[in-house]
Image (cartoon, rainbow, N blue to C red):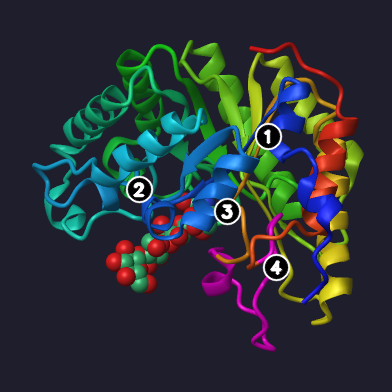
């Protein structure tokens, strides 16, 4: 374990640095972690100015039965955010994953629209006035897989066709006219054919939504980056961001982390390589004034989805986030801090 650096630990937190530039910095986590781990909760309150609900506002968490809504965990997160002066961000109204077990038996062509609109009206309505933003539709694009017209083959698409996206945004806008409504997706970052197809498909969808007057306000770029991916081209990414911004949309980096699966095990080399990815990516995207928020998918390596979903073959714990598993700041933290310090200022919203 690296030596603790007291100067680094005393430095201005990420959220404060972001705030200086009119940006938001936040992290995703769950009510359970906040409630059971007070040191982690304190780190979240210190580093962030926005809190993202990682799992507690997904259908699976909110809908124990077709008739019921359980806001216990979501409300606990909202209360923590409020108590610590953090903005709060909802994830996600419409997704093909994390659906409740009853979904397949209960939701049909006949009742899908009713279920979708009831859900969004109730959930977005419940947090109306408290939410900075909502990922209204998550991961709707699939230009190269089994998709239909570039859209992913999901239960919502099968039941309602492409209209489900319009329905979701209109319903969310009516339920909370003040939240920023986001279309969120992944694989938009690299200069590889898969990501190029995704960028093209999402631009097309955003253009159509805007042309139809659908209330979509921002693109969420998940940005689960890979330290071993050599094909990063700042020009291509900047050009894409400019095209999104030209539609009048904001951009949020919503689920940033860096997969270290294929890096050498040695901590120092690994941490520097991960930090370098953060630095290069953020230096690129923060040049675009429409980018208003940088949100990491977790704050500390103590809790990261990558431990389960992208394990290292040598069994070493992944180190994808700004704080290490002991909650000390890592080179990744310094890279994000320096990217914020160097970022052009935005108007404070
Ligand atoms: O709720 C059960 C719990 O009762 C049980 O004890 C535990 C044992 O493993 O599992 C719990 O459920 C897990 C849940 O996370 C809560 O921790 C699920 O198995 C697990 O699949 C679920 O994973 C989440 C995943 O989305 C699916 O919902 C990850 O934490 C979360 O980080 C991940 O986040 C997604 C975004 O929503 C969308 N973009 C990609 C991103 C990463 O996959």
The residue under the point 25% across, 24% down is: 121
Label 1 CB sits under 8 Å from any ligand 1 atom: no
In this view, 222 is above or below 315:
above
Decide: few, some or many residues near mark 4? Use Cα within 10 Å; few <14, some 14-19, many ≥20.
many
Q: Position of residue 216 (x, y in %)?
A: 51, 20
Ligand 1 visible in quadrant: bottom left
State the residue in front, 233 or 198: 233
- Name the secondary structure under disc 2: loop
Q: Earlier in the sequence, mark 4 or mark 3?
A: 3
Q: Is residue 296 visible?
A: yes
Q: Position of residue 42 (x, y in %)?
A: 54, 48
| Boundaries of the magenta span | 303-324
Main SS of the magenta part reads loop
CA separation, marks 2 and 4?
24 Å
Q: Which residue is mark 4?
A: 319
User: To which quarter of the image does residue 328 belong?
Assistant: bottom right
Q: Which residue is mark 3?
A: 298
State the residue in front, 10 or 89: 10
Q: Which residue is mark 1?
A: 15
- Name the secondary structure under disc 3: loop
Q: Which residue is mark 2?
A: 56
Label 3 CB sits under 8 Å from any ligand 1 atom: yes
């Amino acid at each position: 374990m690296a030596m603790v650096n007291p100067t680094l630990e005393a430095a201005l937190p990420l959220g404060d640095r972001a705030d200086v530039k009119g940006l938001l910095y936040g992290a995703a986590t769950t009510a359970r972690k906040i409630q059971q781990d007070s040191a982690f909760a304190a780190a979240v309150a210190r580093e962030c100015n926005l809190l993202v609900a990682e799992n507690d506002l997904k259908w699976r968490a909110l809908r124990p039965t077709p008739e019921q809504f359980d806001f216990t965990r979501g409300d606990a997160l909202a209360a923590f955010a409020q108590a610590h002066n953090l903005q709060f961000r909802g994830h996600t109204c419409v997704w093909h994953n994390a659906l409740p077990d009853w979904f397949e038996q209960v939701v049909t062509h006949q009742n899908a629209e009713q279920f979708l609109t009831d859900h969004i009206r109730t959930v977005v309505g419940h947090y109306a006035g408290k939410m900075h933003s909502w990922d209204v539709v998550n991961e709707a694009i699939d230009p190269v897989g089994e998709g239909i017209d570039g859209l992913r083959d999901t239960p919502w698409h099968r039941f309602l066709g492409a209209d489900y996206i319009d329905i979701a945004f209109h319903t969310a806008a009516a339920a909370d006219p003040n939240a920023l409504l986001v279309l969120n997706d992944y694989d938009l970052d690299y200069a590889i054919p898969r990501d190029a197809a995704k960028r093209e498909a999402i631009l097309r969808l955003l253009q159509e939504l805007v042309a139809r007057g659908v209330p979509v306000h921002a693109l969420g770029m998940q940005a689960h980056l890979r330290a071993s991916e050599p094909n990063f081209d700042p020009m291509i990414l900047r050009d894409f961001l400019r095209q999104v911004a030209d539609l009048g949309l904001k951009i949020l980096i919503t689920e940033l982390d860096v997969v270290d699966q294929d890096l050498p095990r040695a901590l120092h080399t690994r941490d520097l390589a991960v930090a370098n990815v953060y630095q290069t990516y953020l230096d690129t995207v923060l040049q675009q004034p429409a980018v208003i928020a940088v949100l990491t998918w977790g704050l500390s390596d103590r809790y990261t989805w990558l431990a389960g979903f992208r394990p290292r073959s040598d069994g070493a714990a992944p180190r994808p986030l700004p704080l290490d598993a002991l909650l000390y700041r890592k080179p990744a933290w310094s890279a994000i801090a320096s990217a914020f310090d160097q970022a052009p200022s935005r108007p404070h919203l």
